[in-house]
């Protein structure tokens, strides 16, 4: 994967879009100190280059009934590449799995889960973390307070 060269205008646009992706092209151009056609062209280029993967709304999980965050370490019974890929494919299809990282050293995976409550966690854990999915060990941590949540990519100069 090749790095994309970003100039100052690109970084301004990306920073603004990470703060609020619902800005109109007119508002975005004004805040980025660009003309609307230039702004539109640059954003399209960033999308086509894959720098902007998608535009989403970040919801307040508690207000929509998903108030329990679990950070889960997973160790598989075998670390063969096909077993790892198979586990990743299973969790990729589960909406409650917010993030999945293959890590080293230590466990094979770290997952961030977002579920309604503890019974929902148990049901999900029973479905995902069984012998059928080649899981040998599970270690879960439950958030009691979130002090920071910033899904922004820092943009270096």
Image: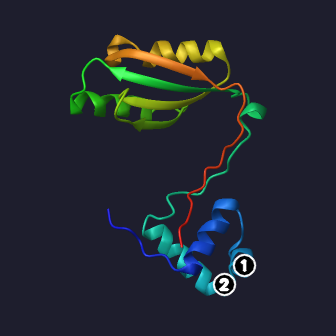
The residue located at (29%, 30%) in the rendering is 84
Q: Residues within 10 Å of mark 2 (few under 14, many from 20)?
A: some
Q: Which residue is mark 1?
A: 26
Of the residues under marks 1 and 2, which one precedes in the sequence?
A: 1
Q: Which residue is mark 2?
A: 36
In the image, taking residue 54 as reference, residue 93 lies left or right, namely left
Pointers 1 and 2 in contact (C-beta within 8 Å): yes
The residue located at (67%, 50%) in the rendering is 57
In the figure, 59 relative to 117: above or below? below
In the image, taking residue 120 as reference, residue 106 lies left or right, namely left
Q: Position of residue 65 (x, y in %)?
A: 73, 28
Q: Secondary structure at mark 1?
A: helix
Q: Secondary structure at mark 2?
A: helix
The residue located at (41%, 23%) in the rendering is 74
Q: Position of residue 7 (x, y in %)?
A: 52, 80
Q: Which residue is nearer to you in this view: 68 or 94?
A: 68
In the image, taking residue 92 as reference, residue 9 lies left or right, namely right
Real-space Cα separation, disc 1 to disc 2, in angstroms: 6 Å
């Amino acid at each position: 994967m090749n790095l994309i060269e970003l100039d100052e205008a690109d970084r301004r646009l990306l920073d603004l879009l990470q703060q609020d992706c619902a800005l109109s092209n007119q508002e975005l151009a004004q805040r980025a100190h660009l003309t609307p056609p230039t702004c539109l062209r640059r954003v399209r280029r960033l999308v086509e280059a894959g720098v902007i993967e998608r535009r989403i709304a970040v919801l307040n999980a508690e207000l929509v009934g998903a108030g329990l965050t679990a950070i889960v370490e997973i160790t598989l019974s075998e670390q063969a590449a096909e077993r790892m890929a198979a586990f990743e494919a299973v969790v990729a299809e589960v909406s409650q799995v917010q993030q999945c990282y293959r890590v080293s050293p230590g466990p094979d995976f770290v997952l961030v889960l977002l579920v309604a409550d503890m019974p929902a966690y148990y049901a999900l854990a029973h479905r995902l973390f069984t012998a059928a999915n080649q899981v040998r060990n599970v270690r879960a941590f439950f958030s009691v307070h979130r002090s920071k949540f910033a899904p922004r990519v820092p943009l270096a100069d």
